[in-house]
Amino acid sequence: MARVRLIGIKKEFGDVVAVDQFSVDIADGEFVSFLGPSGCGKTTTLRMIAGFDMPTSGDIYIGDTLMSSVEEKKFASPEERNIGMVFQNYAVWPHMTVFDNIAYPLKIKKEKRSIIRNKVDQNLSLVGLEGFGERYPHQLSGGQQQRVALARALIMDPEVMLLDEPLSNLDAKLREEMRFEIKDLQKKTGVTIIYVTHDQAEAMVMSDRIVVMNTGYIQQVDNPREIYENPANKFVADFIGLTNFVECEVISRDTVLLTDGTGAHKLKAHIPSDIGEKAILSVRPENIEIAERDGDIKGVVTRTVYLGNMIDYRITVGDVELRVESDAEEVFPEGSKVTLRFKKTFIFSV
Amino acid sequence: MVGLRRITKGRKIGLGHLVMGAPAVLLILVVAFPISLIFIQSILSEEGTLTLDFLQRIFDVRSNYWSLINTLSISLLTVFFTVLIGCPLAWIVTRTDMPLKGVFKTLFIIPYMIPPFIGAIAWGFLLSPRTGFANKFLMALFDISTPPFNIYTYEGIVFVMSLYFYPYVFITVAGALERMDPSLEEAARSSGAGRFRVVRNITLPLVAPSVAAGALLVFIAACSNFGIPALIGMEGRIYVLTTRIFYYIYSGGFEEGLQMASSLSIFLVITSALALLANRWYLRKKQFTIIAGKSMRPNVVSLGKYRIPFLIGCSLFSFATMFAPLLCIVLISLLKAYGVDIAWKNLTLANYKFILFEYDLTRASIWNSIKLSLTAATLLTVMGSLIAYIIVRTKLTARRVLEFLSTLPYSIPGTVLAIGMILAFSGKFGINLYNTIWILLIAYTARYMAFAVKSVGASLEQVHMSLEEAARISGAGWGKTFRDIVVPLVKPGLIAAWFLAFMPMLRELTVSVLLFGPETRTIGVAVYEFQDAGYYDSAAALATCVLIVIFAGNFLMKRITGGEFGF
């Protein structure tokens, strides 16, 4: 098991910068997700850790070993890195049985036959595929193929496991099940896991820390709770969970003026020091209190959707439509005039 | 992902580089070098200055001038007739309710499998003015004293070429008609267009690009063909470029003849290149997709009372153009002597005994062809796979060059390739392979390399990159990954490539006839020489053997590849 360090990684494909200024220190046994929309550079970064792509600059350490460094002209090829990897499309070899697939890394290492047999059996039961050894991949379901891929990645006791959107090809129910199974596997084996996904729920459920990425740059590195409750910027607030954005002007050190046609409301807010005059206020739907009167801002309910445990409102305030989630105790029908109060807000630069 | 190792290994060259680099170096040596020599030879004077003298000198001889005109006119006429035959046949088997149309779809492709020079021999047997079976039959039937047909004419060449090259049009047009989205035509019908209006306004314009593609293949096949004009035209002194080049190599004196041959080759290359350009120009604004993704049921026209007449017509066509000539060859191969009556008492297997067990020349040529085809097919499958791997899997800039070089020898006429081989490997540059089996081996390998590159490349496209990456991350190096993952997964492509190259090489004529030496005759050359020298019964027997091997091999290939390759 090993710590993984990426220091100042940059990757260019021709003129396109795919990843830049990427530094992260992943602890031994940690579960870290790279989360972001497609094209954000998360898979590219994973492939650089695996050794399939070479960074344009920067260093990669796995444990204490320098695996990749442009400055020192060092680059370990994938087979030299002792990494387990699970691919998006499983990449289970169709011409080999389940047993042969899982045994392959050990055969490469020229392990004894008896050891191979034992370890493969062990790993088959670890992923819940006892008795499937003699089958061919085409006789397995997607979920089972995924387990084969997991067992194959785990069998050589890798220092690090890399998972590239491993659940995106599975149906919703199986996906939820597998999340917990992967997390369990990690607890059992203690392996360091780097997990690439564009699905925030997946990242939230499994990760110790999440690296949120966009357009090749890290936006925020933190644990799931911090990422949700204290997003570092507008992108993170928008990408993780739901939020409302309202344009505003900073008028004093702790006051903003909403300028988005909401009727020039002044609000107290925590304003980071590096914010200019024009700013954006972000407020999550569950952080807006809705009441008949006594609120700060007046609005009209334009849509009410009853969701059982809560109510999802659309409320028009001036030119803006805000999304508000409130418990189902008091229901405001469409067309009713209400007042709103923002409980927790963030101010971001534009 | 070769190339990544650069950094670990510093300046040291890895095994991967060597394995990958070897085919590239070989391609340059056996393809780029010989073919560029043809151009150099034709435009560079002995003093090393640019000159058009050689190209002009060709036209001092009237026969050369006529051979160029003949090549162009014969090829164009052949294109015309193949379109005339191929399109209706394609329509019949794809868009009508004629009985047995599936059977005919296979039958109409048969001429594609038969070597054109064997076709030429067969038609000679049928329509030769003095002894042709069909001529004698018609003379007896209608009580006429002069034979109605003479195959050894300009028209004869066009006739035989049309019958053996129409499958190019047939296959491309049938494919387009089958895969065309039927809703395109249905939309026209519901817009108020009648059945024939739809054909004119919708169907024909949509298949036009496929017709053009087939026509281009026919044109190139016709102007590069050697067998038909050699066996039919040379008797009547009708020369085309390929036969004229052959004439110069054999009758022109080595240096002088080679000079003229390579200058003539330039015209042959230009002719096929012009056809390619004309095709591109025609297709430049016709890049529409008519093919629906999934296979659909095409609109079928009901022939009504014409179903049976159509069936009879197709049967007669198949009989007259396929069975009659083949039957004729088989019959002659079984006769005691050419020209005797067809009767039980005149039948014998002596011809087969002679060519297979008694005559050293044919035995040697059979052995040569087998040796050559086995070795070349294996060599080119290995090299072609590596080249396909580089083309499909790497981002090296050189891969476009490799792709071009590996497919070039099949895109240019075989005659031209052979001239290039002679120029490069007959001692001028320190390597003399002329008259040895090695020059044939190099030529065969280069000529059919494209098959391996294309077929393995296509298989490789189907193998997702992550399957290889999974092996790398499991600890396998590049070589192990190739052996354990890539090779087993592209196996069908490898087998197909091997067969696709092996079969035509076994009976190759165009290249062999220019490169063989006294000790290195091949089957194709032997058949040609027998026929040329008037040993028709031996020619027929050997040709029959070739046909049997072709049909058996095709059947075998279809079996092995699960129907993906073969007809």
Image (cartoon, rainbow, N blue to C red):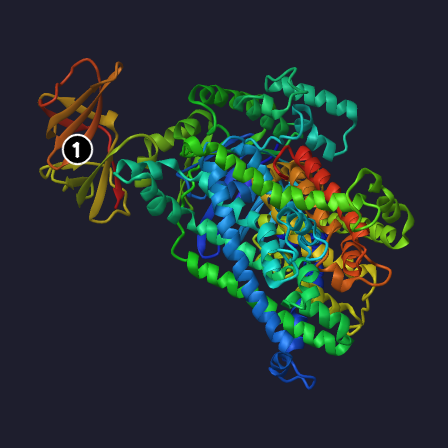
Total number of numbered labels? 1
Residue B91 placement (x, y as % from top left) = 46, 41
* Residue A341 appears anywhere in the view: yes
Tell me: B185 left or right of A9.
left
Judging by the rendered image, the residue that carries numbered circle 1 is: A321
Tell me: B282 left or right of B69.
left
Along the viewing direction, whichever of B536 and A155 lies nearer the viewer:
B536
Tell me: B275 left or right of B433.
left
* Residue A50 appears anywhere in the view: no
Residue A61 placement (x, y as % from top left) = 59, 43
Q: Chain of mark 1?
A: A
Residue B110 placement (x, y as % from top left) = 62, 43
In this picture, is B46 found above or below A214?
Answer: below
Along the viewing direction, whichever of A121 and A5 lies nearer the viewer:
A121
Secondary structure beneath label 1: strand
Within 10 Å of the Cα at label 1, are there few (<14), some (14-19), or many (20+) other Cα atoms? some
- Which residue is at a point 54% across and 31% down the rendered structure image? B100
Residue A34 placement (x, y as % from top left) = 46, 36
Along the viewing direction, whichever of B23 and B87 lies nearer the viewer:
B87
Tell me: B229 left or right of A341.
right
Type of amino acid under label 1: Glu
In this picture, is B378 found above or below B424?
Answer: above
- Which residue is at a point 60% across and 24% down the rendered structure image? A189
Along the viewing direction, whichever of B426 and B275 lies nearer the viewer:
B275
In this picture, is A147 found above or below B5?
Answer: above
Answer with the quarter of the image where residue B59 lies.
Answer: bottom right
Q: Which image quarter holds the C terminus of chain B?
A: top right
